[in-house]
Amino acid sequence: MHPSFRSMVWVVAVLAAAVLAAACLYANRSFDHDDAYISLRYARKLVTGEGLVWNPGERVEVYSNFLFTLLVATLGALRVDLIAASRAIDGLALIALSAFLLSTVRSRAHADSAGRPSIPIALLCVGASFSLLVWTLGGLEGPLFAALSCGGICLIARSLERGPLRGGGAPRPAREWRQGVTDAMVACRTWRKPDGCADVILTQVVPIGFAGELSKGCGEP
């Protein structure tokens, strides 16, 4: 692909993603889901020193997003409005998701020049994901879960490509740092919601085990 044409594709993709995202966010700017107020009430009670309770003295767990509730409460303790805090967390999660996705796609595209058009496609996929954008405003943990899932899977994919399973690869400190970040993301996903453990097993543990057995069967050249 000619460099000038590639640059034009990049510009068009960035502008299209920005326009789609801005239009979606503006059209849904007043949206917040009623279920979000369950987590916000628990966060408020935690900030005021009453603990993770719905009513004082009643230890009933109604929320199902422990990590998200803690993050909202942390910002609330810094005197950030709780609705604004939930949106800020989801907004940062959306940015992180985009960064993980683009970084992984870009590294693969550099290894294979035929894959370079996939970079703007990945950008457009995030910018055109109306459900992801709308839930950034909705006050629930969907975008945070998406970011943790995407980040964990992207890091695992890169580890499988150039990490210990392939022999050699990145220097040991780099591999250990990447593995540590991956482990943290997996742990956060299990904190995100009770079904996080099953999700981790299906999307990360099983693929890693399969890839490990595959590498043993193929052997090293």
Image (cartoon, helix red, strand yellow):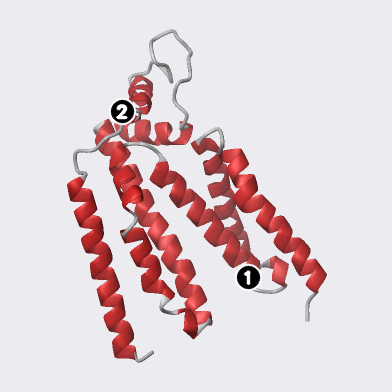
Q: In the figure, 26 relative to 65: above or below?
A: below
Residue at the spot x=55%, y=57% of the render? 153
Q: Looking at the rendering, which quadrant does residue 30 occupy? A: top left
Q: Amino acid at mark 2?
A: Asp
Mark 2 or mark 1, whichever is nearer to me = 2
Outermost residue toward the bottom in this view: 2
Circle 1 crowding by C-alpha within 10 Å: few under 14, some 14–19, many from 20: some
Q: How far is disc 2 from disc 1 in space, using C-alphas?
A: 43 Å
Outermost residue toward the top in this view: 57
Q: For this rendering, which residue is in front, 87 or 180?
A: 87
Q: Is residue 169 left or right of residue 145?
A: right
Residue at the spot x=78%, y=77% of the render? 220
Q: Amino acid at mark 1?
A: Glu
**Can see residue 174?**
no
Residue at the spot x=27%, y=69% of the render? 14
Please state the horizontal and vertical placement of residue 127, each as a whole percent of the image.
Answer: 31, 60
Q: In the figure, 124 relative to 95: above or below?
A: below
**Can see residue 61?**
yes
Residue at the spot x=55%, y=32% of the render? 194
| Secondary structure beneath label 2 | loop
Q: Is residue 166 left or right of residue 217?
A: left
Question: Pointers 2 and 1 in contact (CB under 8 A)?
Answer: no
Q: Quadrant of the C terminus?
A: bottom right
Kindly identify which residue carries mark 1. 161
Q: Is residue 135 left or right of residue 151?
A: left
Circle 2 crowding by C-alpha within 10 Å: few under 14, some 14–19, many from 20: few
Please state the horizontal and vertical placement of residue 18, each as a whole percent of the image.
Answer: 24, 63
Kindly identify which residue carries mark 2. 34
| Secondary structure beneath label 1 | helix
